[in-house]
Amino acid sequence: MRITALAGGIGGARFVRGLLRHLETVPVAPGAEPHRVTVIGNTADDVTMHGLRVCPDLDTLMYTLGGGVHEGQGWGRVDETFSVAAELKELGSEPSWFTLGDKDFATHIVRTRMLNHGYPLSRVTAALAERWKLPELGVELLPMTDDPVETHVVVGPPDDHPDDGPRAVHFQEWWVRMHAAVPARKILAVGIDKAEPAPGVLAAIRDADVVLLPPSNPVVSIGMVLAVPGVREAMRGTRAPVVGVSPIIGGSPVRGMADACLTAIGVETSAPAVAGLYADFLRGWLVAPEDDPRTTPARYAAGLSVRAVPLLMSDVDATAEIARQALELAESLR
Ligand code: GDP
Ligand code: CA
């Protein structure tokens, strides 16, 4: 089976880890190729900090799938130390609100060196993914694009300076420093018009047996992958059934602040509203029992196959079951 998933960080990574666990139990037909999972990661969260290029979603995917993630946090490395960050702070080197551990720094140093030597991000990502043995797991990790794209958020003016007018900040500043508590007026994908899909991205969508949308942030994660010119068309054109997992359970984003992103684009925080963002290609939608179309008013598009199952990714086995349900739904649509 060739499975392609579009993914952000924590939600995407946890889902794909569950998918891999499930695939271990799916026999490969004699003579057939082993299961292959291609993950197309969001790179619009990327940011340069202390002169180093940081790709938070790709790193979360690598660390999670490779077994090196800090479980409680969902991002960053387990057993991490923070000597470099402490010294940078002593030196007054900003920003200090974005936590980078020592081991994490090593990733960003290697990435930045390779980028500075002219390697495209996709090659750099492949090299880093080897460190985490993703190829041995049957996983190919692709950035959505090799071109620089950054999500910027228009906020303000602050209440105490009403004359300042709005200003744009990097997504990370809004998300991490401001905890998305300052309402976003607009979410911009800077550089997206000129971005091209990274090598392999369109083929992975076109040639897949199943395309999955994990429960990633629909605006700043999946929305950015879809905004790379050509990707949305490929999603519409693929013969593979496209099945998504709702990141919203009963009106709440479970964890994180996806509701702030949805509000910014004028979309309700609900499972049907998120499905509506994918209406032009989505065929199957897994929702939580709270959002069951049989018990809640029919707010889903006609023709969309909606199935209600528990969607809390509480551990790897529970997540494997969600992935199994997604594949079963896809199979029923083939
Ligand atoms: P980020 O890049 O680290 O913010 O992660 P993603 O974009 O991949 O995913 C974040 C989204 O995952 C959040 O906005 C939540 O809506 C969703 N999410 C997190 N945990 C769960 C879970 O256990 N179940 C479901 N259904 N969604 C979840
Ligand atoms: Ca992210």
Image (cartoon, helix red, strand yellow):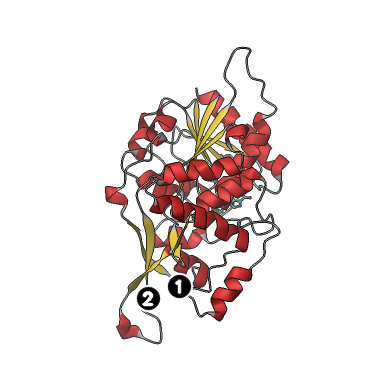
Q: Residue furthest bottom?
A: 160
Query: Relative to the observer, which residue lies in front, 182 or 287?
Result: 182
Secondary structure beneath label 2? loop
x and y, in percent, of residue 326 in the image: 58, 34
Task: Identify the residue at horizontal 36%, vertical 53% (top origin).
Answer: 148
Q: Up-down: is 288 above or below 27? A: below
Relative to 49, does residue 136 appear above or below in the rendering? above
Residue at which label 1 appears: 182
Q: Which mark sits nearer the N-terminus, 2 or 1?
A: 2
Question: Residue 19, position in %: x, y?
Answer: 62, 36
Where in the figure is residue 110, as x and y percent of width and height? 51, 53
Residue 156 numbered mark, or none: 2
Residue 145's quadrant in the figure? top left
Q: Quadrant of residue 198?
A: top left
Query: Going 33% across and 36% down the picture, which residue do you hit?
Result: 233
Q: Position of residue 299 (x, y in %)?
A: 48, 44
Residue 151: in sight, yes or no? yes
Disc 2 to disc 1: CB gap under 8 Å: yes
Please, what secondary structure does the residue beneath circle 1 have? loop
Front residue of 178 and 83: 83
Disc 1 crowd rating (10 Å Cα; few below 14, some 14-19, many 20+) is some
Q: Please tell me how crowded label 2 is: few (under 14), some (14-19), or many (20+) other residues with Cα within 10 Å.
A: some
- Amino acid type of the residue tagged 2 in the rendering: Gly
Residues at marks 2 and 1, CA–CA distance in whole angstroms: 7 Å
Confirm or reject: label 2 Cβ below 8 Å from ligand 2.
no
